[in-house]
Amino acid sequence: MGHHTTKTLISAEDIETRITEIASELNSRFSNKELLVIGILNGSILFLADLIRKLKMPIKIDMVGISSYGNSTTSGQLEWTKELSESPANQNVLIVEDILETGKTLQAVIEHVQSFKPRQLYSCVLLSKKCEKTFPIKPEFECFEIGDEFVVGYGLDYAGNFRNLPYIGILEEKSESSHTSSELTGNDLMIRIQFWSFYRDLVESDSADVVVTEKTSLEDIKNLIGQTWPQLQDHMNSMLIAVNNDYYEMSHVPRDGDIISLFPPVQGG
Ligand code: IMP
Ligand code: MG
């Protein structure tokens, strides 16, 4: 098993700004008409929660569950996991989805909702991938168009993980280093690595999330960092490593959610 890191594609601030814009479009389109917002589980929950807080009309919420079989990064056969709780007949409906890839999922939900004969039906997606759309649907509201890359965070998952990241990141797969593969417990935990000073320029990022196993010591993590970011290799001997702002022995084993900060030694006076 390899581990994964993420690289920020859309920051939490940019997501917020764009949702504010989309919400004001929705506010003017629907003015004071009651809106039934139907979220598609599980990926849309963060987007839906942030979007509806900015809507001014009376709102009702329902959720529909659909997931696609396939491996972790490709969609396949659709499986319904939750039916709507109430009929959307005669209502103004907005379907909220996390990401449009082929369009298959959204198309299926639109057809399903349409069968109840809503008064009006619109859809709103957070992300739309620039790739071949097998199903020619065009959501009326779209926050961001992205490239054909696999993304996680802000509701989106990779094999169930990463949904809680506050930003949208591109998933990067790294090969497993030899010394940790023998220690795999199947009990993964996620730690955030924060880069400071010129390390940020070297790795072209402020931070990265890394999934490691429970038995990984700071020494192991340091080795992993050297392998993952070879551009830091020359600085490994002088690197200062803090866990949640405290210093520990290198045998210390970080816990899930810990923030590991990497600093160069202080230069000059
Ligand atoms: P579609 O049915 O091909 O349009 O794919 C849409 C569904 O696949 C979404 O509901 C997501 O659950 C999933 N999906 C597609 N691309 C990504 C991605 O980059 N990251 C995470 N999930 C994705
Ligand atoms: Mg989904």
Image (tube, rainbow, N blue to C red):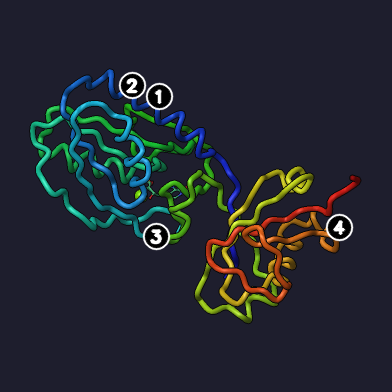
Say if disc 2 is inside 8 Å of ligand 1: no
Residue drawn where x is 56% and y is 74% of the image: 214
Which badge, 1 or 3, comes first in the chain's sequence? Answer: 1
Question: For the residues marked 2 and 3, what is the alpha-carbon distance in whole angstroms?
Answer: 35 Å
| Mark 4 vs mark 2, CA separation in Å | 51 Å
For the question of whether residue 84 can be seen, the reply is yes
Q: Residue 70 bears which disc, if any?
A: 3
In the displayed structure, does residue 17 sit left or right of residue 203?
left
Mark closest to the chain's N terminus, 3 or 4: 3
Packing grade of label 1 (10 A; few <14, some 14-19, many >=20) is few
Closer to the camera, 196 or 185?
A: 196
235 with respect to 166 (left or right) = right
Q: Position of residue 135 (x, y in %)?
A: 34, 38
Q: Position of residue 43 (x, y in %)?
A: 36, 49
The amino acid at mark 3 is Gly
* Closest to the observer, 86 or 220: 220
Which secondary structure lies at badge 2? helix
Q: Residues within 10 Å of mark 4 (few under 14, many from 20)?
A: few
- The residue carrying pointer 3 sits among few (fewer than 14), some (14 to 19) or many (20 or more) residues within 10 Å by Cα, namely few
Q: SS for tag 1?
A: helix
Q: Amino acid at mark 1?
A: Glu
Image quarter in which the C terminus is found: top right
- The three-letter amino acid code for the residue at tag 2 is Glu
Q: CA distance from mark 4 to mark 1?
A: 45 Å
Gap in angstroms between the C-alphas marked 1 and 3? 34 Å
Residue to which mark 2 is pinned: 25
Please tell me which residue is depicted at 30% across the width and 41% down the height of the picture.
Answer: 106
* Closer to viewer: mark 3 or mark 4: 4
Q: Which mark is residue 234?
A: 4
Residue drawn at point x = 56 percent, y = 47 percent: 170
